[in-house]
């Protein structure tokens, strides 16, 4: 992830202050519901108030608490990446969930199980080949074809119309509900404007050409899903989606909490703010120009690179390379560093895996800790599909399926 799109500093705002931090064991995840509510509303404003156009990716939200905030505001369509995220979405009132990750083997069978448990929830999956389609025969699971627009992670190459047509026909031949196309253009996260809009709109034009080509072959598209957080404004400004015959939905997830990357990618005019911080304490002052806090990469994810975060209200501190439990911070020349024992508030560079690092989160409102909530969709289910397997007889069912 390019450091071009990362905030270098984040000003202090008293909304983040915890009035009585002495009882807080660090590192800790702090979630600010008023900021979440504001971010949800900012997204709905971009959507013209149409909550139905947002298929929110819950890989970021992770907490049932946050899922319920989305659902209470009319966001009922979701996508997810794991069976545990699917399960939590179904349990909390989602109406339509796309498992936006290739499910194979026992993972696919688990999706079938969850569908049987929640028959009223419309559940769909991604497919890109006949094997993935055949495994859903006899189910009432919907199929979205996964289109690769250049992200080169999963999907059928966008230019391979022949294969896309063949897979759409295969889904129909298997008597499965063919729902549409999934198009995640996440490769543009480090592209600046105006090149960003130009590049994404070129891809969307080709996507519409594909939809029309499928239509002439008798394959009607009912829904097209585009856009994570960086390309959200581009998707919403593309005129072809506004007049399309299909339902167009966008699927950002990071917008709910925001992080040091997304806040640099998205214009301040949209009104987004940070809603999730990591609390850490200074534990050492090993050198004149370095202090160390207790938020290593087991707390603040390092998957997006170094620096892993921004220290809120401390532009004189620059996070260095973390180890598992330690995060050294360079102190600017001439600056007075925080003292050992002082509390720091860290804005993650990548909030999604950072949230996944924690078992629970502090819910902070008006400087008070209002509650402690489980990070309900952290990690994965499993590791065995058969919960009665003798190998897991000593593990509680809650640990197996959460």
Image: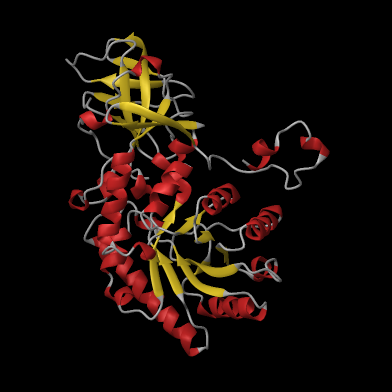
Residue 83 locus on image (x, y percent) = 60, 51
| Residue depicted at 46% across the width and 71% down the height | 158
Q: Quadrant of the N terminus?
A: top left
Total marks shown come to: 0
| Residue depicted at 52% across the width and 58% down the height | 100
Q: 85 and 102: which one is in front?
A: 85
| Residue depicted at 53% across the width and 69% down the height | 144
Q: Quadrant of the C terminus?
A: top right
Q: 53 and 347: which one is in front?
A: 53
Residue 399: name its quadrant: top right
Left or right: 73 in relation to 106: left
Outermost right residue: 390
| Colour scheme shown | secondary structure
Residue 301: name its quadrant: top left
Residue 317: name its quadrant: top left
> Would you say residue 260 is visible in this rendering?
no
Residue 245 locus on image (x, y percent) = 38, 81
Residue 137 locus on image (x, y percent) = 70, 71
Residue 34 locus on image (x, y percent) = 29, 40
Left or right: 27 in relation to 387: left
Depicted 48 relative to depicted 86: above or below: below
Depicted 378 relative to depicted 210: above or below: above
> Would you say residue 244 is visible in this rendering?
yes
Depicted 201 relative to depicted 335: above or below: below
Left or right: 277 in relation to 385: left
């Amino acid at each position: 992830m390019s450091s071009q799109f990362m905030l270098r500093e984040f000003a202090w705002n008293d909304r983040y202050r915890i009035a009585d931090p002495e009882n807080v064991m660090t590192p800790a995840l702090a979630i600010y519901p008023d900021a979440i509510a504001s971010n949800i509303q900012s997204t709905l404003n971009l959507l013209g108030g149409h909550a139905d156009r947002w298929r929110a990716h819950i890989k970021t939200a992770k907490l049932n608490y946050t899922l319920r905030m989305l659902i209470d505001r009319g966001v009922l369509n979701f996508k997810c990446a794991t069976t545990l995220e699917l399960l939590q979405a179904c349990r909390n009132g989602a109406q339509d969930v796309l498992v936006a990750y290739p499910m194979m083997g026992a993972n696919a069978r688990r999706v079938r199980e969850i569908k049987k448990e929640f028959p009223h929830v419309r559940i769909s999956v991604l497919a890109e080949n006949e094997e993935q389609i055949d495994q859903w025969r006899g189910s009432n699971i919907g199929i979205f074809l996964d289109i690769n627009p250049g992200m080169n992670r999963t999907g059928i190459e966008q230019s391979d119309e022949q294969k896309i047509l063949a897979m759409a026909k295969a889904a129909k031949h298997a008597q499965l509900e063919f729902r549409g196309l999934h198009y995640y253009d996440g490769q543009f996260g480090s592209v600046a404007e105006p090149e960003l809009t130009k590049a994404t709109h070129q891809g969307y034009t080709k996507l519409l050409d594909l939809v029309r080509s499928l239509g002439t072959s008798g394959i009607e598209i009912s829904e097209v899903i585009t856009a994570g957080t960086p390309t959200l404004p581009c998707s919403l400004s593309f005129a072809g989606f506004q007049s399309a015959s299909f339902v167009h939905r966008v699927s950002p997830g990071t917008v709910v909490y925001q992080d040091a990357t997304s806040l640099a990618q998205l214009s301040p005019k949209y009104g987004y703010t940070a809603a999730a911080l990591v609390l850490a304490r200074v534990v050492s002052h090993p050198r004149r120009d370095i202090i160390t806090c207790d938020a290593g990469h087991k707390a603040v994810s390092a998957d997006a690179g170094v620096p892993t975060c921004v220290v809120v209200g401390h532009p004189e501190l620059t996070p260095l390379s973390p180890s598992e439990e330690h995060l050294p911070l360079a102190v600017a020349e001439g600056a007075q560093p925080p003292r050992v024992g002082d509390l720091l508030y860290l804005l993650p560079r990548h909030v999604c895996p950072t949230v996944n690092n924690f078992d629970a989160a502090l819910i902070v409102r008006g400087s008070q800790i209002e509650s402690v909530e489980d990070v309900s969709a952290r990690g994965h289910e499993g590791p065995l599909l058969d919960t009665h397997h003798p190998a897991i007889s000593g593990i509680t069912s809650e640990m197996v399926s959460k």
